[in-house]
Amino acid sequence: MHIFFHKMDEVKGRLLEKINSPADLKKIKLNQLPEVCNDLRNFIIDVVSTNPGHFGASLGVVELTVALHYVYNTPYDLLVWDVGHQAYGHKILTGRRDIFKTNRKYKGISGFPKRAESEFDAFGVGHASTSVSAALGMAVASKLNGDKERKVVAVIGDGAMTGGMAFEALNNAGANKSDLLVILNDNNMAIDPNVGGISQYLLNISKSHTYNRFKTDVWEGLGKLDGFGKKTRRFLQKNQHALKNMLLKQNNLFEAFDFRYFGPIDGHDVIYLTKVLNDLKDIPGPKLLHIITKKGKGFKQAEINQTKFHAPGIFDKITGEIYSCDCPVDQAPKFQNVFGETLVELAEQNEKIVGITPAMPSGCSMNLMIDKMPDRAFDVGIAEQHAVTFSAGLAAQGMIPFCNIYSTFMQRAYDQIVHDVAIQKLPVIFCLDRGGLVGEDGPTHHGVFDIAYMRSIPNMIVSAPMDEIELRNLMYTAQLNEKNMPFSIRYPRGCGIKPKWKQPFEKIEIGKGRVLSEGNDVAILTIGKSGIFAERAVKSLFLKNISAAHYDMRFVKPLDTELLTLVFKKFKTVITVEDGVIQGGFGSAVLEFMAQNNFTTKINLLGIPDKFIEHGTPEDLYKECGIDTNGIINSVLQVLGK
Ligand SMILES: Cc1ncc(C[n+]2csc(CCOP(=O)(O)OP(=O)(O)O)c2C)c(N)n1
């Protein structure tokens, strides 16, 4: 492999050290802004190489961030970031430089903008495509409050612009005429290369000299009228505005939404950016500024391998070598890879199988299928709602769709699951990656609601494998489509426990749990990954002379009522464990079963309490919620009064 060496400047950070707020930034001379950008970029590289987080996106908006805080009067003016993974520079310039080293750490600052963290973080975020709606709300509120001076700016990437919500907001904002600036940060990348008609449109518009020349002519007031006769010239001049609008609307998507479109301009020229932003400040109404940037700008390896450097883990800041965050050799692979490889294996055997991912092909490993069977695997853009209904359409015509969406992003598509899939009993297979506490991304990304939101939907089979072999077998079982119903399989982030996971497929009986340990003193009922902690707890309890039985229930719906009846007849104390919310989750399902069958057994429900869990390592967070091995042991000791 060819290694590129990143050149760090010898005298680093001199200007950045003086900046503790945007007020300090404003004291710096315009011609020194490139140096500020250089310092800021090096600071981000320095910190993120050792304390991992999102990387390429923040590097790409260094100039934009500096220009925005230079020109606008934040926090009075409101700056709304879309997704928020690109806001590291913003955090560093707004008083968080010294604590930036705690980024994403337990009790440290969040990796995303967060209202509770800083007055400069105008809107909390983590999921894509929300910025224009939120910014419009703020602009309208300013108008209603009589706050005429306040400016509102939304920064949205071309990836996030593929989300339907962004278009709902553009549609509304154009009609509303509020004073709002949307900056479209176009780097032609989501996490993977951006896909779809919009990304193609943005490419075309950026490349089309004809369009840009034409647009400039029009904006400059139809200056080149000399070739026309007198009458025509007078007509054109009189109707200049209407004509301009007509021509632009026909040629520009954003103009068609009644936004004034500016650009595309170079998003890495900080001085020019400040000039343009200053000009735009005085133009009323909804405006869109299209800037072209490079994801990973200024760090060679990140510019070349943009997907890997979206969130690379720890890396060498000189050579760009990534210190792999893969699972240790000889150990079990990541659950996502088991999904990706198994999907290809199943699809090779069953030609009806298709794969759908909303913009997460690398994240969920569906890139394996996209590479092998490009006609049968679809990256549909950041469009969870569409992904679900698109899958429903495929299923309606006899295909077997594996629709893989992170648990947290699936929240977006709830009505589509209910209305388009479940009511019609369409056999879509939902694979919910990143179920449970995901760790450093924090509350916007924890996949803790899915068990509760899936189990309340009629016709839905709800399952969660404890390990990789179970995941494989559940995927195998789901595509057999015996029940002709939607089937959800949720599994966690990270590595599993079975190095030898590639076993021959075995059908799992739907709605049947399994006994992992027999015991007499207490029964531990688990779903999904919690079973791993419970297995360890059972071993420790054995050493304390406590005989715990362990049941991996595998299905939250249908529940294995036969197994539960045996358990509740035998045991006086039962514990349920899940890495999802307690309210309405797996434990609740067991409680409902108890009530319906008049069992009065002593029961402890372990799971996520009724609050948002912050960020930290998964270990920290599982411990905090008392659902790791020790938490289960303590709960057993407590119910047994020991
Ligand atoms: C609703 C939702 N789906 C998926 C994601 C995962 N995700 C995080 S960043 C990203 C790509 C964003 O691309 P873009 O908006 O162009 O920003 P860039 O990273 O290129 O700066 C995706 C898909 C998300 N945050 N929210």
Image (cartoon, rainbow, N blue to C red):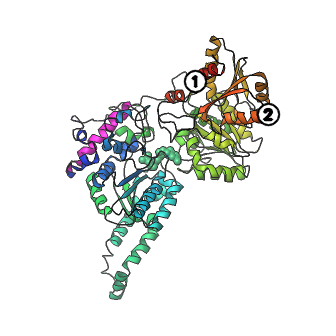
Mark whose residue sits in front, 1 or 2 = 2
320 or 76, which lies in front? 76
Query: What segment is highlighted magenta in the picture?
Result: 31-52
Q: Going from the N terminus, do you reach mark 1 or mark 2 first? A: 2
Q: Residue at x 54, y 29 (%)?
A: 622
How many numbered discs sit on the rendered protein? 2
Badge 2 element: loop
Label 1, on which residue? 631
Residue 216 percent across, percent down from the top left: 33, 68
Amino acid type of the residue that numbered disc 2 sits on in the rendered structure: Asn
Q: Are marks 1 and 2 in contact (CB under 8 Å)?
A: no
The type of residue carrying mark 1 is Gly
Number of other residues with Cα within 10 Å of mark 2, as a class: few under 14, some 14 to 19, many 20 or more: few
Decide if ligand 1 comes within 8 Å of the CB at mark 1: no
For the residue pair 324 and 352, the one nearer the viewer reads as 324
> x and y percent of residue 408 in the render?
56, 42
Q: In the rendered view, tell whether residue 217 sits above or below residue 124.
A: below
Q: Magenta stretch containing residue 32, yes or no?
A: yes
Displayed quadrant of residue 591: top right
- Quadrant occupied by the C terminus: top right
Q: Magenta-highlighted stretch: main secondary structure?
A: helix
* In this view, 631 is above or below 254: above
Q: Quadrant of the N terminus?
A: top left
Place of residue 369 in the rendered image (x, y in percent of width and height, measured from the top left): 59, 41
Find out whether residue 309 is within the magenta segment.
no
Task: Give the SS element for disc 1.
Answer: helix
Label 2, on which residue? 597
Residue 156 x %, y %? 43, 53
